Amino acid sequence: MAMFQFLVALLLVRSLIGGRAHSHKMPITLDQDADRVTALPGQPLVGFNLYAGNVTVDRSEGRDLFYVFAQCSNDTYGTKPLVLWFNGGPGCSSIASGFARENGPFQILPGGSSLIINEFSWNAEVNMIWLESPTGVGFSYARLNTTANTGGGDTRTAEDAYNFLVGWLGRFPQYHGREFYITGESYAGHYVPQLAKLIVEHNSASPLKINLSGYMIGNPDIDNYWDQTGDIDFHYSHAMISTETYNGLKANCNFSDENCCSTRCEEFFATMNFEIGNIDYYSIYTDRCIRSNAKPMQSRSWTRKTPTDRGMRARYDPCSEDNAEVYFNRPDVQLALHANTTGVIPYRWTMCSNVLYANWTDAPQSMISTYHYLIAAGLKIWIYSGDVDSVVPVTSTRYSIEAMKLPVSKPWHPWYDYQQVGGRTVVYDGLTFVTVRGAGHQVPLLEAGRLLQVFRAFVSGKPLPGAPF
Amino acid sequence: MAMFQFLVALLLVRSLIGGRAHSHKMPITLDQDADRVTALPGQPLVGFNLYAGNVTVDRSEGRDLFYVFAQCSNDTYGTKPLVLWFNGGPGCSSIASGFARENGPFQILPGGSSLIINEFSWNAEVNMIWLESPTGVGFSYARLNTTANTGGGDTRTAEDAYNFLVGWLGRFPQYHGREFYITGESYAGHYVPQLAKLIVEHNSASPLKINLSGYMIGNPDIDNYWDQTGDIDFHYSHAMISTETYNGLKANCNFSDENCCSTRCEEFFATMNFEIGNIDYYSIYTDRCIRSNAKPMQSRSWTRKTPTDRGMRARYDPCSEDNAEVYFNRPDVQLALHANTTGVIPYRWTMCSNVLYANWTDAPQSMISTYHYLIAAGLKIWIYSGDVDSVVPVTSTRYSIEAMKLPVSKPWHPWYDYQQVGGRTVVYDGLTFVTVRGAGHQVPLLEAGRLLQVFRAFVSGKPLPGAPF
């Protein structure tokens, strides 16, 4: 099996050399055919093909990255872009969040028994890949050096993702040459620009060209200093913490120091967490998931249908992570997805790997210089921000972007999603910033319709609607 | 009729003199009986009595204030407090907002054909009066000096409200001596402390004692300087306006000047309004009411029932004002309410009087000295703030309260509504501040359940729950 894969990969890498391929005339490879998902258990009928499988990114350590690929459901002429999605963490699964809960074609019903159509899936617009990255996340696993599953870092993650892309485009040569975009959220604020930079560098140095057109990231980690400064400003201005604690944090925490923080600063952080209380930090105004059998809020939130069912409580299922954890641990689901085919992954599939998170190294303090590099390289770069996330809040993202000191080409203005303000946007030379009104950290989960407008504008290169329509 | 009322009033004022009355043993007066609302059109069966009518507050100008009174539905021993509610504006109707949409016993269904029970009505806890104040608002009208309906000011409003109370307690002597609280929201931040001060003054000077125990106000106007400073801070920190506009407002607007603002400041205000876009300023993350026939958001918001119906869109009806305007203009409703009985009110009943708002005078810059007076008088004072209102935002209210420089007796901490954080609270010597998480300006409309917890704690004198329950 390994040797066969190797031969096919060789053949396909050769087919990629020499510029753009004629996408829809390319042959379907044997590995591509093997990755075809006939049907996911409980799946409704759809008009596009789904693929899933492993791409080996390092043979010596047996490092395989697992992906799911949904063909664009409206790709009549075989010209729609190819888009890669990363969740963050580091250590969180792009299958669990991206594919199964955010911008994928299906959503998992409670109990994990079946799937329904997600009417806001991005594969209505583009061909979408969700990548479990790095090894140790979800179904991505290093078979021969298992320490690679319990720790990671930015550089290896970017290199593995690049090797994944080369391998995947070898397996799916009909998509080579398509407009290619990288997307993601949260700690993918590191993954996405780092991978973009690696592609730009390889494109200029090697004969294999990847047609990278740009990237878009939501609520991204950009710069530790501004992220943390914006975080405490957000907590204070959103009435989550006391004035005393805010002043204490400002006076005692040195966020420009990588080894922040002093004991006094840590004490104020502890007070801050107490003062905020037990909320969903990722969506500060919605209900948090209550998993115990004490469910008064849950039942109030989900069963009441009278006009007195008011306010802004979450209308998404805050416990939908549970559905994914049930579903992706089903043997029939894994079989259908060609996941864990070697049977060597010793743990259950989980949303996020805490051990990977805890052992993360090699994370630069700031991505700002990488942004400058990629702006200079001419990429289309969009950053969006769900404005009620307190983990990477909109204040942090604004501070980081403003620290880039880019000239404004179209000043701050509201954008509309039908009759309602979807958020606000400002266009800089080289970067577009978009807020999504009322959305938490996982914008494609919490304001899926609004973000689909943003995604369409990003891909099409059209401005966001500046008036109701 | 007038002479008869006068005689009854005389009799009852005499009965009030000399301290507390034995509430549930007092006789039912003839006027009280005349104010009994047999049933409102479309009303479901309830287990309490409803009253409505006019109380003359100035005979020479024929100034009548209209009220609706809902007896407490759990007042077995006749000991439950009496609570008065004011909406703000100035110029907005307490019947429209308070009684019919916020904390009253019913809510009006779309079309204005019938009423349903509001499960969060405050009259489950107390005896509630909603007062149309001043004349020119709703069904309150000056018959003999109609200029009093097109302009107003704080001092007369407070005096009229005091005279209303005396008259009303004369008509309902069984409630005299009960614990009495004044409540309201928004510009009632002026009405409530001003009426409270007048009661304290009259209580010490005259034989008629009103058993005022305290007051509670939501998103109140307190101090023009801090309100406006907090407003632009809120807009900036909530990503509603650009950094440039924020800095321009800070540099060019002098909020400590009553005649703020310079032309340059006004220009920045115009830019601010453009940048924010067409949202509901009173609840910045929910849908605004779309009244035209272009209703894509409306239908999306109200009809979708799948799990993809995500996010934080309003689950209350943002057009519920329309229901009230239909309902209270129905002749059968007015007849049932004993409203506009003289038939002299020349205009339709409306939510708010714009002419009154435009001609408002006599509004002090700050209520802070009044707070100090009332804290010294020993009143129980609570201020709550829905934290996603941009009209009197939580930042403004915090700044105003902090400017009072009260010692903290119980520091900032979260409070819980069942399993979820309801908001945060801090107890000062003499004043309790409570935020209501995710609520806009009209907190009893937008987070009714959470605010009912706050109201119960306020009335009972118990602390808010500091842990999930």
Image: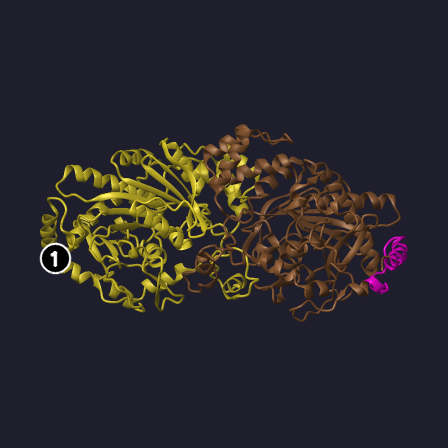
Chain colours: A brown, B yellow
Q: Examine the rendering and report whether any part of residue B356 can be seen.
A: no
Q: How many marks?
A: 1
Residue A332's spot in the image, x, y percent?
Answer: 69, 66
Please state the chain letter of the residue tagged with numbered disc 1 in the rendered image: B
Q: Is residue A323 above or below residue A60?
A: below
In the rendered image, residue B360, in percent from the top left (x then y), is placed at 33, 44
Query: What residue span does the magenta drawing correspond to?
Result: A3-31
B116 relative position to A328: left or right: left
Where is residue B343 shown, x and y percent of the image? 23, 62
The residue at which mark 1 appears reads as: B27
Query: Camera-side residue: A376 or A220?
Result: A220
Q: Quadrant of the N terminus of chain A?
A: bottom right
Q: Position of residue A275 (x, y in %)?
A: 47, 40
- Quadrant for the C terminus of chain A in the image: bottom right
Magenta-colored stretch includes residue A400: no
Relative to the observer, which residue lies in front, B162 or A54?
A: A54
As drawn, A93 above or below B431: below
The answer to which of A339 and A388 lies nearer the viewer is A339
Label 1 amino acid? Answer: Pro
Viewed as shown, does residue A289 lie left or right of B198? right
* Residue B326 visible in the displayed image: yes
Residue at figure coordinates x 88%, y 57% from the top left: A3
Q: What element does badge 1 sit on?
A: loop
Q: Is residue A278 above or below residue A257?
A: below
Q: Main secondary structure of the magenta part?
A: helix
Quarter location, residue A178 = bottom right
Reply yes or no: does residue A11 show up in magenta: yes
Within 10 Å of disc 1 (Cα), the crowding (few <14, some 14-19, many 20+) is few
Q: Quadrant of residue B405?
A: top left
